[in-house]
Image (cartoon, grey):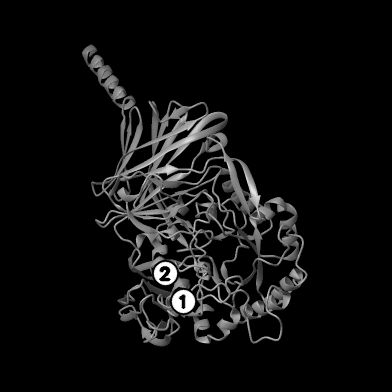
Amino acid sequence: MKNLSKLFVIVLMMTSVTISAQKEFSLLSPDKKIEVKVSVDEKIEFSVLKNSKALISPSPLAMNVNANVMLGVNAKVKNTKTNSVNKILQREVRQKSKEVRENYNELKINFKENFALTFRAFNEGVAYRFETSLDGDMKVNSETYSVNFAGDYLSYFPEEESFMSHNERIFNPIMLKDIKEKQFASTPTIIDTKEGTLIAITESDLEDYPGLWLKGTAQNSLTRIFPAYVLDAQLKRDRDLMPTKRAEYLALTKGTRTFPWRIFAITNNDGDLITNEMVYLLSKPNQLKDISWIKPGKVAWDWWNFNNIYNVDFRAGVNTETYKYFIDFASKYGIEYIILDEGWYKLGDLLSIEPEMNVQEIIDYGKQKNVGVILWVVWKTLDDQLQPALDQFEKWGVKGIKVDFMQRDDQEIVNYYWKVAREAAKRKLLVDFHGAFKPSGLFRAYPNVITNEGVKGLENDKWESLVTPEHCVTLPFTRMFAGPMDFTPGAMVNVTKASFKPMFTQPTSMGTRCQQLAMYVVYESPLQMLADNPTNYYREPVCMEFLSKVPSVWDKTIVLDAKIADYVLLARQSGNDWYVGAMTDDKARDFTVDFSFLDEGSYSADIWQDGINADRNGNDFKKISVEVNKATKLNIHLAPGGGWAARVYSK
């Protein structure tokens, strides 16, 4: 018996040593296809595999804080905790769906140095974050974030020139080894292994910390670069607050906190990037008790079309009569909002209205017509007058604000987004951030943040020729992965790529009319713009049949066929109706639409398709109606730069 007791003690000691000395950890996704491996030794490294094939080779993680304290170097494991979650969430504001499945396995490694690393493995990808438990306030000097890939993969790299940026970039395909050390990009950035796997890199729950950017290494890796804390800045015009001196640290923040999630979405199906919800799932939960007042919808926008209405008996421009005309148009077609963009107030003072504008009269007129008014503002002016301006907007009956020209995502500006979202919500105001960095979870924490620019959208057609059909079919897999995307579609004058010329006051779009219509199905934005002027829309009643009915939020999304930078074909459900949208790059394409997503029964399908001459004249389209059911397989043709849109409803 004495010998048995000795043996038990020896086994217990061996077991304890094994547990306390463990330096290798493994975490599997619920479907066991994705594995995260974590190694803790002199440094902490993680690697990622899918189906036992390495995608990310061992890559270091660390954080330098306070007086050069390295969290993650010679760190000692204190304990670990695991957790699994599998539940259905109801979206506060529908985007791609009204329900989201949250299903992941979690590993949290607590270290004796008062920090932790949490890893989550989803079937759709992996993520990790730092967490610190330090007394008082903390200075973050740097964060070690390098991603070593298992091969020389292709990157869709939205290269930037400066941290002062609208983050409106082209996603240039470039091999990792060809990205030099001086080249850097905003996120999301997409990696294509060219062996059937895509990896989307971005972040979520970004708060009180600078945004993540990536730079090249001339090797099979990307490393981090962050905009440092701003010490001094110079204001140019009323909107461009240009940093003139930056600190040698990233952030001054609380010592006890969580840090942003570093996301790696992983898929063998390009279309899965469109339905991926990891940014939403890793965001801070909704902070608002009452969200019943948050109303998604479409909005008639003035700035892109330069208020170039015609066939009216008043002078068009930034004046009361013009906006009443916009309201009449919106009311006729059931469009929920109009925007008063730049020009309604005297720049530099939100409380000083231009004499040709009677904002209260416009808002009251809109109320009579069931059309809400959203006001454009320069972010810096709003910051200077935040409380009195928002109080005045609430008094007027404004429904939302479009906040423009931040152009930064250092700690100060990231915090500004949260402040505006919070203060706007107190007054039941929607927020649309323009001149903005990518969505990083704020749209869940504050659902009144209804949409977000940070995309090279239609407005660029006013001054350059970069919004090509190829760019337009790249966006659903890249920028839109991060969250709502205010591309501002809806051009009613459409030309081929060869014929396109930028025009500021009378802009056109590159590609076909039906590609513009399809964007309302393909592009996700709970506040969806109609960018052209009402007179042009009045001239196109057949297109308005579609634009007046297409929703801006969805109950379900099914990607039918998709290839990054080439084409997309998807179906979205809203109530009992389905909408189908297809877009192609510069190549004509043929698809077969499989309607097996429908329930039993007969349906009518109203279809807007490229006309026979759309390859020569982008305005050419044809509307047809056919009967379909779940057994229907319909052949469709898209012209170069073309599109296809359908509304499917019960007979």
Q: Is residue 248 left or right of residue 193?
A: right
Q: Is residue 62 left or right of residue 408?
A: left
Q: Position of residue 561 (x, y in %)?
A: 32, 69
- When the figure is inspected, residue 568 is found, relative to residue 72, above or below; the finding is below
The label nearer to you, 1 versus 2, is: 2
Location of residue 500 (image quadrant): bottom left
Image label count: 2
Secondary structure under badge 1?
helix
Q: Which residue is mark 1?
A: 517
Three-letter residue code for mark 1: Leu
Looking at the image, which is closer to me, 458 or 646? 458
Neighbour class for label 1 at 10 Å: few (<14), some, many (≥20)? Answer: many
Q: CA distance from mark 1 to mark 2?
A: 16 Å
Location of residue 628 (image quadrant): bottom left
Three-letter residue code for mark 2: Thr
- When the figure is inspected, residue 252 is found, relative to residue 624, above or below; the finding is above
Give the residue displayed 67% in from the left and 80% down from the top.
325
Looking at the image, which is closer to me, 43 or 430? 43
Q: Which residue is mark 2?
A: 468
Q: Position of residue 387 (x, y in %)?
A: 73, 52
Secondary structure under badge 2?
loop
Neighbour class for label 2 at 10 Å: few (<14), some, many (≥20)? Answer: many
Q: Are marks 1 and 2 in contact (CB under 8 Å)?
A: no
Residue 508 in sight from this viewpoint: yes
Q: Position of residue 392 (x, y in %)?
A: 75, 60
Q: Disc 1 or 2, which lies upstream in sequence?
A: 2
Q: Which quadrant of the figure contains the C terminus?
A: bottom left
